[in-house]
Image (cartoon, rainbow, N blue to C red):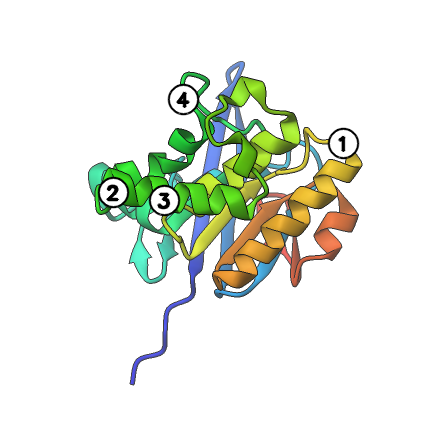
Amino acid sequence: MSTPSPALAATGLCKAYTLHGKRLEILRQADFSAERGETVAIIGRSGAGKSTLLHVLGGLDRPEAGEVWVEGSPLYALSARRRTRLRAERVGFVFQAYHLLPEMDITENVMLPAMALGRLSTKQMRARAEALLSRVGLTERLRHTPLELSGGEQQRAAIARALMNEPPLILADEPTGNLDAKTGEMVLELLFDLVREQNALLVMVTHNPETAARCSRVLTLVDGKLQA
């Protein structure tokens, strides 16, 4: 009987950028492994490469070396098209800047990941989106556009969108960074609750020690590598 693959694993990740003619090494043989049900915080000094690491783990930014596996599937061994499909099926992103489309109402924004997969009818997608928005306390805002929502409401809508396809992996990049303390606390509680309900893995970049301490594990990015 084979051992189940981790929800997310990575080995030997290397990534560098060239700035003003100088090569900056961001990731240096970084390794990572985590299971469903875990909440993992990634901390480190500003500019250490935490967001870059998260983008590489989620298939948004190709590493120069190394590989990432999402539930046993190798991200960067796949074609760009298949990688995009796998990301849509298995990864949900929550960004600090929300990234909601202003020309769509929030129900349509939440439906977008399901539209990319094309497995549900429009009626089914809308029903699931509205159920998720109700779960995050936005029942009265279903037909509102992002610009009609507060920052906290937009972030709650973004969390609903990340969970639309029930992905096993949620990646959150400073999800409360643009919110006041009280709203940030509410959004964080909601994110933890929803991830727990879906038995997903949450990997969260944060600069806040108190937020990190609430996770089941804390890893620090130092000199391009993750340290426990």
Residue 61 in the image, given as x and y percentages of width and height: 40, 35
Which numbered disc flags the more N-terminal residue, 1 or 2? 2
Residue 43 visible? The answer is no
Question: For the view shown, which residue lies furthest in the bottom direction?
Answer: 1
Nearest-to-viewer mark from 2 and 3: 3
Amino acid under disc 4:
Met
Q: Secondary structure at mark 4?
A: loop
| Tag 1: amino acid | Asp
Mark 3 or mark 1, which has the lower sequence index? 3
Closer to the camera: disc 3 or disc 4?
A: 3
Give the mark nearer the N terminus: 1 vs 4.
4
What residue is pinned by disc 1? 180
**Label pair 1/4, CB-CB below 8 angstroms:** no
Where is residue 137 shown, x and y percent of the image? 59, 42
Check whether the beta carbons of the residues at disc 1 and disc 2 lie within 8 A of each other.
Answer: no
Q: Tell me which numbered mark, 2 or 3, is placed earlier along the sequence.
A: 2
**Circle 3 sits in a helix, a strand or a loop, which is it?**
helix
| Residue 214 visible from this viewpoint | yes
Structural distance between the alpha carbons of marks 1 and 4: 26 Å
Tell me, yes or no, whether the two marked residues, 3 and 1, touch with CB atoms within 8 Å: no
Q: Is residue 196 above or below residue 146?
A: below
Q: Which mark is residue 127?
A: 3
Residue plotted at (73% across, 49% down): 211
Residue named by callout 4: 104
